[in-house]
Amino acid sequence: MDARYVFAVRFRLDPAAEGVSVDPGEFETRLARAADPPGEEGWLFFRDNLWRGEVNDDEHFRRLTEEALGVDVRSVEYRAFETDEEYFEALKDAIRTELATFNADSVPAVLTKYLGSSVELR
């Protein structure tokens, strides 16, 4: 099973040494975060951080990303949930057993509510 959340991260480098500069000072890169196995600790990352295919708290998520990367992060945009079929089926099964947690009537409703249309099967 394999799945990851993908983000576009814009960050800035501010050299600490005097006389050192970078040009350009801002960059954009692709950040991938491994998805935890369905039903295990951390598997609700999508519920806690995404809403309709967008980061649900920009400031909070930007700070988390700064901590993870050790750079001044200007912005983070959610791009996709990339998954293989095996993980996706296990995720849907885990959601199905927890529908009340999501205040939803169906698995597709949960997926749309949090991931939008960003699921990419590999």
Image (spheres, grey):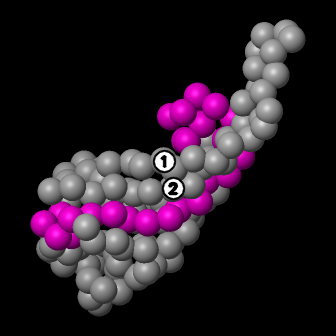
From the viewer's perspective, is 10 left or right of 111? right
Secondary structure found at label 1: strand
Q: Quadrant of residue 37?
A: bottom left
Relative to the observer, which residue lies in front, 46 or 100?
46
Number of marks present in the image shown: 2
Residue 79 belongs to the span the image colors magenta: yes
Q: Amino acid at mark 2?
A: Phe
The image shows residue 39, relative to residue 14, as above or below, that is below
The first of marks 1 and 2 along the sequence is: 2
Residue bounds of the magenta highlight: 64-88
- Residue at (58, 28) in percent of width and height: 70
Kindly tell me whether residue 60 is visible in this rendering: no
- Residue at (54, 33) in percent of width and height: 69
Q: Quadrant of residue 47?
A: bottom left
Query: Real-space Cα distance between discs 1 and 2?
Result: 5 Å
Secondary structure found at label 2: strand
Q: Quadrant of the N terminus?
A: bottom left
Q: Which mark is residue 7?
A: 2
Kindly tell me whether residue 5 is visible in this rendering: yes
Residue that numbered label 1 is attached to: 31
